[in-house]
Every structure is written in C-alpha cells, then in structure tokens.
Image: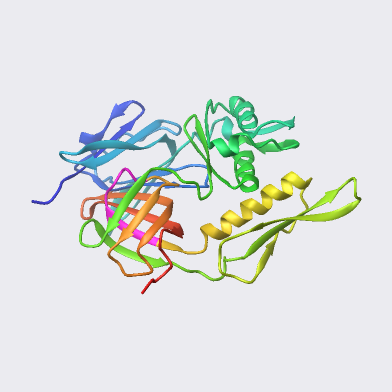
Amino acid sequence: MSKQALFQVTVAGTNITTALMPVLISLSVSDKAGTHSDTANLKIDDTNGQIILPKKGAPVVVALGWKGEGMRVVFTGTVDEVKSSGSRGSGRILDISAKGFDTTAKPKEQQQRHWDDTPVEDILKDAGEHAGVTEIDIDADLAKIRPEYFEMRDESFVAAGERIARETGGNFRVSGKRATLSKRNGSYPATVIAAWGSNLHSWSISPQLGRPQFKKTKARYYDMAKADTLEASQDTPLDADAEWEARHLEADEPAAKRRAKSDAATSERDAGGGSVTIEGNTSAIPDGLCIVQGTRPGVDGAYSIETVNHSYSRSGGFTTSLELKHPQQGAGTDAR
C-alpha cells in the first residue's frame, strides 16, 4: 500500500486546506543556506475562482508530511505576489508566491549606523531591532567575532547580514522575525539519509570539482605601524596547487584573517556537490548533512545540504530535492 502525502496551508490565520484539495496543482517550498529568505509557491486551478485572492503581506504557513507520520511546518512567511494567468487552451491558473519575511516591512529598509569593537551578535541584534527582527540565532563561534569597526551606510538589515556572513564565513537568512547566521561547513546534528533501494529517487553528483579548489587563500591589509601592505593566509586540506587572493584590501589584520578563513571555507564547500531527490522528508534543513548510500564508491558519503526544495503535486506526490556541497566522510574518494 503506497503512502499518502499530506499538506496543510494557512493564509491570514484561516486554514484553507480543504478548499485547496480539489484545485491545488502543485505546492513547493525552497529554503537555501546563505540566501536572505525562503520561498513558497502554490499553483492553483482557478477555473471557477473559488479561492479568495489573498492580500499582499498576508501571513502564510505551510506544513507537509505523510499520513500516519504527522506533518511538520516547513514554511512561515507572507504573501509576496499573486498572479492570475489563462488562455483558451490552458484554462485559468492562480500562482501565489510567499517569502520568508514581509517584503514590505523594515528588514529591507536602509539604515545609517556604526559600531566600534562590537561582537557580531550585538551588531545583528541592534540592527535587527530596528528592522523588526527580534530573534537572532547565531553560531557560537561567529557570535564572539568583534570587528574593529562595522558601518551600515544606507544598507538594509538583510544586506548587512549577508555581508557579515561573507566576511566571517557564515550563511545568513531571515525567516519571519528570526535571523540565522550559521557557520559555513559547520558541524550541525540534523541528518537525513538518501539510500538507493529505499528513499532515493535519483541523484546527480560530482564529488570532485577542480575549478573551485585552492590550496591556500590570502587577503591583504594595510599595516599602519609598518606603513606597508601585508598579507594573511589560510591553508585548506584540498589537493590543489593554485592559491586564491581576495581582490579588495581589508581594514586590518584580524579582518584579513577572517576573509582568508571565509574564502578557505568556501573553497572546501564548493570542492564537490550535486543533487539528490528523495521521498518527502521534512527533517532536511540547510546546513544539515545528507548521507548518500548505495550509489557507487567515491560518491557515497556525507554532504552538507545547501538547499532544500519540497514539492507536492497531484501527480508526483511529495518529494524533497536537496542541493549538496562540501563532500566529506569518504565522498570524493574511491578507496578500492
């Protein structure tokens, strides 16, 4: 007996699941590490226009799961765009797009402020308070980093968070009133299995990619005491001869060291990757691990999850596609 996929959608506090069941064509949710917001899309058969047109900014909650196993919320956000389309041949379609944060609200508003010798966690809390983002979830290693000077010059909270992530080796995203700054290539406990003969539908993985790999990353800075331009560097464990040097001069030695370390983490992350599609699994989250099993030696192993895409449709049921990076635990090495 095949499993039955379940979904639940709430818009503006009203559960519209029952009304959606006969007209929902497809539902998708995407959550990516290192981008500022997750997204949800609903495609609806709008032949009779029975679904009330949702208002811009209306709260949206989406849950997915399986009968007998329960459901889990995979998206919380607000309506960003509603589009009606149709033709004589294809009928009428209503597309509803939602973002993880209200795109009309203060997270996109520019701020002008600065901080001196302040921990990254406090910078994000101060800037987030003005933007209405009151919950800051930050990796402990990144929270204690103290830039000598950080300035927002006509920069939004979202843009500032993404810049901090680039400079410290993190991944930044906003969901509702929560902002998350995770550590790039961090060791987080969330794990899913993608096993051939069990839940793995398909895969396309390159466990080794030559172009992104560098044996060392470097960043330059100007030393005021020595009146000279100096260099900070970070070695990587990758088997490569080329070295990477950041294009722009950093403010001081600590900033140059952070930049070199961040670029090294990026090189390790991008050293291999690909995608898998598995039976719908709401446990998969960005920055978690996916353990690939049963494909072939050299491909099997662990990968960091970069993007999670949940898809529900009338014809295809419930599947989860994962974009993978940062091969580890044997991935990329054929030991035979």
- The relative height of residue 238 versus residue 306 in the rendered view (above or below) is below
Q: Residue at x 66, y 32 (%)?
A: 119
Percent coordinates x, y for residue 2 in the rendering: 12, 51
The quadrant of the picture occupied by the C terminus is bottom left
* Quadrant in the picture for residue 278: bottom left
Near-viewer residue (89 or 18)? 18
Residue 243 percent coordinates (x, y): 67, 66
Identify which residue is drawn at 54% across, 59% down. Answer: 268
Quarter residue 201 falls in = bottom left
Please state which of residues 233 and 6 is positioned toward the viewer in this rendering. 233
Vertical placement of residue 190 versus 267, above or below? above
Say if the magenta span includes residue 143: no
Q: Is residue 31 left or right of residue 295?
A: right
Residue at 68%, 38% (x, y): give it.
Answer: 155
Colour scheme of the picture: rainbow
In the image, residue 95 lies at what x, y percent?
36, 46
Q: Which of 309 and 15 is in front in this view?
A: 309
Toward the bottom, the furthest residue is 336
Please tell me whether residue 321 is drawn above or below residue 65 in the rendered image: below
Q: Which residues fall within the magenta stretch? A: 275-284
Residue 206 position in % (x across, y down)? 43, 68
221 relative to 186 in the view: left or right: right
Residue closest to the eye, 312 or 221 = 221
**Is residue 283 covered in magenta?**
yes
For residue 202, what is the image quadrant?
bottom left
| Residue positioned 73% across, 44% down in the render | 254
**Number of numbered discs overlaid on the protein picture:** 0
- Residue 95 shows up from this direction: no
